[in-house]
């Protein structure tokens, strides 16, 4: 939200921080534990318990920033903690996602990165700067579904109250996973939502199926954005995964304000990347749906391996045309083929209503299955 010049105080707007030292964000009530000498910097969350991070009612306001860190950053915890946000007393959450994925990175992997909306400066924390307006109430909670107790959850929810949000849209976030995807059925980053709003973008995680496709490139699929009644064909269409996030010819590790690939594990063929439509807004007035295709590319050094493996590889396109990789087939040295891999994503959007009617978050076992047990922190090797 734009509050005007930094040197102007908006009339009637007050600042609050909800934290373990002041869970209710109450005026004049912060830091009372241990006689004010850092008595409650963090709180535990036992398995199955819910921790309310912030709860405000009877006023308008804007959540400005959320910061957190936890003592257990293993994949089972990053995907096992469920973050939910409710606006204006709604019964269902507008935001429902695993903690790690909501804060900008996926696959249960920490990454050192910084972008316009999210960041983890040293790969040990979670920062969100997405403005989240509400008109009468907000509630932010974390539920531990990891199967084990969490010893320490540190957090700050920084927000203001008394803001004029009468015309503001509500923030929503939707996480999903397909493990694996279905051949020739485009993966839905955002299933169809109705209303007026703005698609902000998403962060996406891919675990390529190396048993089936070796180390071939997986990211030739096009992003498609269906807007306001689009059916068979979308209004917006990209040219490939790496193109969509502003690079080309594959994806290495980088983090920029609106686009990046903050996990590029070529050895294990795991990737986390993002694109946020801030300078290039994606508006919708009736409905929106966002998908990406699962299309790969073979190259000359893979032809003999595919031939030896013997499993069918289907050429990209309509129908199911198997590619003949035999020595005398005359197969092209490069070609596009349909794939099935492990894809997951967290999509962010603003909507003119506090509920979105999207499917509920998948259970923790589905969220955490087949993740690396001890993945390295991306970017830690270059920490200064």
Image (cartoon, helix red, strand yellow):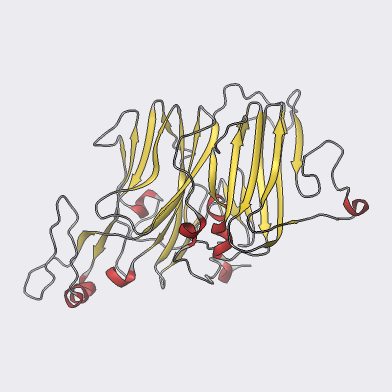
Residue most extreme to the left = 328
Above-or-below relation of 63 to 125: above
Horizontal and vertical percent position of residue 65: 66, 43
Q: Nearer the viewer, residue 8 or 157?
A: 157
Q: Residue at x 83, y 35 (%)?
A: 27
Above-or-below relation of 179 to 174: below
Horizontal and vertical percent position of residue 371: 47, 66
Query: In this orientation, does residue 1 appear?
Result: no
Residue most extreme to the right = 35
Above-or-below relation of 208 to 309: above
Q: What is the total number of numbered labels drawn onto the structure image?
A: 0
Quadrant hosting residue 53: top right
Q: Residue at x 43, y 31 (%)?
A: 283
**Left or right of 361 on screen, residue 159:** right
Query: The C terminus appears in which quarter of the rendering?
Result: bottom right
**Left or right of 329 on screen, residue 112:** right
Query: The N terminus appears in which quarter of the rendering?
Result: top right
Horizontal and vertical percent position of residue 242: 36, 55
Horizontal and vertical percent position of residue 322: 13, 62
Q: Residue at x 58, y 60 (%)?
A: 146
Q: Residue at x 44, y 27 (%)?
A: 195
Above-or-below relation of 21 to 7: below
Query: In this orientation, does residue 203 appear?
Result: yes
Residue most extreme to the front = 48
């Amino acid at each position: 939200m734009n509050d005007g010049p930094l040197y102007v105080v908006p009339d009637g707007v007050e600042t609050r921080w909800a934290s373990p030292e002041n869970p209710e964000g109450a005026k004049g009530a912060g830091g009372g534990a241990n006689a004010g000498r850092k008595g409650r910097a963090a709180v535990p969350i036992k398995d199955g318990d819910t921790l309310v991070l912030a709860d405000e009612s009877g006023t308008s306001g804007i959540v400005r920033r959320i910061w957190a860190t936890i003592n257990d950053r293993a994949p089972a915890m990053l995907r096992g903690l469920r973050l939910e946000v409710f606006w204006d007393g709604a019964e269902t959450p507008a935001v429902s996602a695993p903690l790690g994925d909501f804060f900008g990175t996926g696959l249960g992997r920490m990454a050192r990165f910084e972008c316009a909306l999210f960041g983890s400066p040293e790969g040990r924390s979670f920062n969100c700067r997405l403005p989240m307006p509400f008109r009468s109430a907000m509630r932010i909670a974390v539920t531990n579904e990891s199967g084990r107790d969490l010893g320490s959850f540190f957090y700050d929810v920084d927000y203001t109250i008394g803001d004029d949000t009468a015309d503001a849209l509500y923030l929503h976030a939707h996480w999903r996973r397909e493990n694996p995807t279905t051949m020739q059925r485009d993966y839905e980053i955002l299933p169809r939502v109705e209303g007026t709003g703005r698609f902000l973008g998403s962060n996406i995680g891919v675990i390529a199926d190396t048993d089936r496709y070796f180390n071939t490139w997986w990211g030739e699929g096009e992003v498609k954005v269906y807007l306001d009644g689009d059916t068979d064909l979308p209004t917006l269409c990209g040219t490939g995964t790496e193109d969509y996030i502003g690079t080309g010819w594959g994806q290495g590790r980088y983090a920029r304000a609106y686009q990046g690939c903050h996990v590029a594990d070529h050895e294990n063929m795991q990737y986390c990347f993002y694109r946020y439509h801030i300078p290039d807004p994606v508006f919708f007035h009736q409905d929106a749906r966002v998908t990406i295709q699962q299309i790969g590319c073979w190259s000359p050094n893979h032809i003999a391996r595919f031939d030896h493996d013997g499993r069918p590889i289907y050429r990209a396109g309509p129908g199911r045309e198997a590619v003949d990789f035999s020595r005398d087939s005359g197969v092209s040295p490069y070609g596009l083929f349909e794939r099935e891999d492990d894809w997951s994503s967290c999509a962010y959007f603003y909507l003119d209503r506090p509920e979105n009617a999207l499917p509920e978050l998948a259970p923790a076992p589905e969220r955490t299955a087949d993740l690396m047990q001890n993945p390295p922190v991306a970017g830690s090797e270059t920490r200064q």
